[in-house]
Image (cartoon, rainbow, N blue to C red):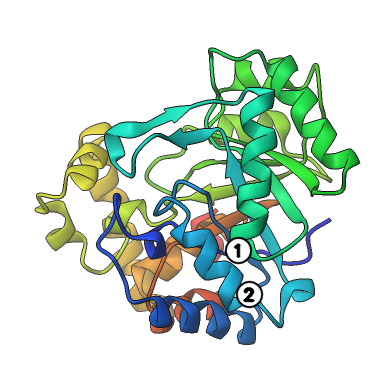
Amino acid sequence: MLKYNLALGLWEIGGYPFFNNIKEDKSVSLIRHAIRKGVKYFDTAPVYGFGKSEKILGKAIVNNREDIIISTKCGLRWKKEKLTSIYKDSSKKSILEEIDLSLKRLNTDYIDIYYIHWPDIKTSFQETSEALNILIKKHKIKSIGLSNFKISQIKEFSKYLDFNYLQAELNILDTKNLDIVNKFISKDKYFFAYSPIARGLLTDNYEKILLSNEPAIKRKIKKLNLENHTNIIQKLKILSQKYDLNIAQLAIKYLLQKKNIIPIIGTTNKKHLDEMINIQQKNINELN
């Protein structure tokens, strides 16, 4: 059972092809700052910067490996370091290759939580499960997670191998994955919520973000019910004044107050991270 309820997501520090590149020293400093502040869980993946994110995490935790929980992923490969070159492959052969590449980049001999990044419909879950079971027996991974799986896929996978962690998008504006939480999350199973502030929509810069031309944000807005999420933002604005907090803190607190849900904080800013850490102990009933 996890004792910690906040995670630092390391997608952005990978930089290209998903984000602008960040100086490595700044990213290392952020991770070490998070560890000093008590953050124990760090989430990365090979495809984040084509291995860069894993390498940075490996460098940052040299003296703290036993104090933290690392999750990384498998099932996304690339032929060239280009976005269009990324493809799904959860075959046994691929996973057995990927694990050693990740261990080397992370400078460790085991991974705490190993996710299938996205379901690969070309490979049977039975074959994928066989590969993961080999890694458990070899002590290369401690536990298994499923990322971005639908309910039907989770049920099918569970026929072959047990898992303790699920990861998918969840925030106060986009709650569709609460169905997964309600069906599968229990005493020894946890849900890690990425995009907890909806790519910046759940911040005090809401109006500015709403006008953004960034493709990922425009896609996010298109998927949401504009009238509904405007009402939610207005409610959060009122609560932010009442509790002297910002909207992002309230969005994180919404998830923290739900049992066995752990938000993944995707930030490269120490101040923003500290704000999220500081909100953990506060109880806000109006968010339930």
Q: Nearer the viewer, residue 2 or 131?
A: 131
Question: Percent position (x, y) of residue 61?
Answer: 64, 76
Please give the name of the residue rendered at 59% of the width and 44% of the height, measured from the top-left corner. Answer: 73
Place of residue 94 in the rendered image (x, y in percent of width and height, measured from the top left): 61, 30
Which image quadrant is residue 189 in?
A: top right
User: Do residues under tags 2 and 1 come within 8 Å of each other at their CB atoms?
Assistant: yes
Q: Is residue 232 above or below residue 236?
A: above
Q: Is residue 217 above or below residue 52?
A: above
Q: Residue at x 83, y 33 (%)?
A: 134
Residue labelled with disc 2: 39
| Front residue (pair 273, 131) | 131
Q: Mark 2 or mark 1, which is nearer to you?
A: 1
Q: Which mark is residue 42?
A: 1
Residue 55 at x, y = what percent? 53, 64
* Kind of element beneath mark 1: strand
**Res 111 → quadrant:** bottom right
Residue lying at the far right of the rendered structure:
137
Dot 2: what SS?
loop
Residue at 69%, 24% (x, y): give it. 92
| Residue 10 seen anywhere in this rendered image of the structure | no
Tell me the amino acid under the disc marked 2.
Answer: Val
53 sits to left or right of 100: left
